[in-house]
Structure formats: structure tokens, C-alpha cells
Amino acid sequence: SQKIEQNSEALNIQEGKTATLTCNYTNYSPAYLQWYRQDPGRGPVFLLLIRENEKEKRKERLKVTFDTTLKQSLFHITASQPADSATYLCALGGWGKLQFGAGTQVVVTP
Amino acid sequence: DGGITQSPKYLFRKEGQNVTLSCEQNLNHDAMYWYRQDPGQGLRLIYYSQIVNDFQKGDIAEGYSVSREKKESFPLTVTSAQKNPTAFYLCASSILGGDDYGYTFGSGTRLTVV
């Protein structure tokens, strides 16, 4: 069956460190992989998109990698700040609609 | 300012009632989507529409209905046939082929059965 797996345990990290989140998938062949941020009680906000022919994408303090052989994406937040505390969702696409993972909560402490 | 508006923010439904959740966008996006979010689960697609007067079922369409009479509007009706409707409902929009660009989400409607 098709699955998108993100770590269900919260990631607790100290301010200034790099947070690394994983998104693993099975039985999908996505053309694109997207990352969203979701705050409690709010809708997700689009952060980054990476295509299947791209290995890495950066945006400010964010970096995403995409390994279609391992069927995995890594999402990095460098120099993390308390304001980065949120749940981060990965989503797979390429067939006209997105399939989402359950998300990983990140807690950045001062 | 362009965006997506969902209303109401909170909605309470009695057993056996149908309720309608509103979703309006002024982004001139062709595609609109409805997702349901339950604790510990990913967003699950209910219905989506890529053009006015046309829509497709998503993964969990049973007990829900939609209409797309205007480009800006995509209301979702939760019918009495939906046995477990308590959830957080999210509406999104995108340009056509939006999985290549990113979705814009509304702020959600939290539906509770009382």
C-alpha cells in the first residue's frame, strides 16, 4: 500500500542548532515533493518544492533534499529559532493532487 | 489582499444534520481542494475541482458533497451519512497543475458533532 511516513515524535532542539526532518514514502513515484509549515489551529503554509530531477533546494535557512532512489526527503532548518516551532508536513505530487504525511512537530527552545 | 476564506471557524452539528462549510478564494486559482485533518493523521483529500462545474472524488468522499458553480467558491456539505464528521476541515486552492507550485490553504473549520 502507499505510505508517506514522517517521524511522529516531536523533535526538540536548542536554538541555533540545525533541525533535520525526514519524509519517507513507499509505492509512490512523485514528480514533486513539497514541504509545508502548520501552526496549531491554522492551515498549512507552503515553504518549498523540489522536483524529482533536483537533488537539493534552498530558501533562506531552509534546505530540502530529495533522493528518489531511497524514496526519501530531508528537510533542514539551520540556525533554528523559537519562531520555527511548528509542525512540518511533507506532501507528494505529480498527478494533479497532493498526498500529505502526518507531519513532525518541531519545538525550538531558547 | 488575496487569499482563501473559510467560514465558520467553528461549527457544531447535531446527529442527523447536514452542514455546509464555506470556502471562497480571490486568487483567481482554477483548482480547489477539500482536505480533512484528524489528530496524528495526514491531510486526507475529500474532493477536488479543477474547473467550474466539474469536481472529482478524493480518497474519502463518502458522506460528503460539493459544488463548483463559481470559480471563487467551493462549498463542502457534510451529510448525515458521514458517520464520524468531527475533524478539522481545510480548503486549498492552486493554479492548475498546482502540485508543481504549492497550495494556498484557508485557516480551517473545526467541526464537532454534539
Image (cartoon, rainbow, N blue to C red):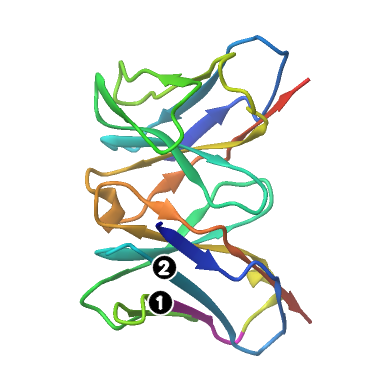
User: Which numbered marker is on residue B55?
Assistant: none
Whether residue A24 is situated above or below residue B67 in the rendered picture: below
Can you give x and y, in whole percent of width and height, for residue A44 in the image?
53, 52
Label 2 CA crowd tier, 10 Å (few <14, some 14–19, many 20+): many
**Which image quadrant: the N terminus of chain B?**
top left
Can you give x and y, in whole percent of width and height, for residue B41 in the image?
59, 51
Chain letter of the residue beneath label 2 in the structure image = A
Could you tell whether B17 is left or right of B23 in the image?
A: right
Could you tell whether B21 is left or right of B83 in the image?
A: left
Q: Main secondary structure of the magenta part?
A: strand
Whether residue A43 is situated above or below residue A34 in the rendered picture: above
The residue nearer to you, when weighing A80 against A71, is: A71
* Residue stretch rendered in magenta on the structure: A72-79
**Which image quadrant: the C terminus of chain B?**
top right
Could you tell whether B27 is left or right of A105 in the image?
A: left
Q: Earlier in the sequence, mark 2 or mark 1?
A: 2
Whether residue B33 is situated above or below residue A90 in the rendered picture: above
Q: Which residue is mark 2?
A: A25
Could you tell whether A98 is left or right of A18 in the image?
A: left
Can you give x and y, in whole percent of width and height, for residue B56 in the image?
30, 30
Write the residue at 29% across / 77% down.
A68
Write the residue at 66% across / 89% down.
A16
Amino acid type, label 2: Tyr
- Residue A61 visible here: yes
Chain letter of the residue beneath label 1 in the structure image = A
Q: Quadrant of residue A103?
A: bottom right
Q: Which residue is mark 1?
A: A72
Write the residue at 51% across / 21% down.
B63
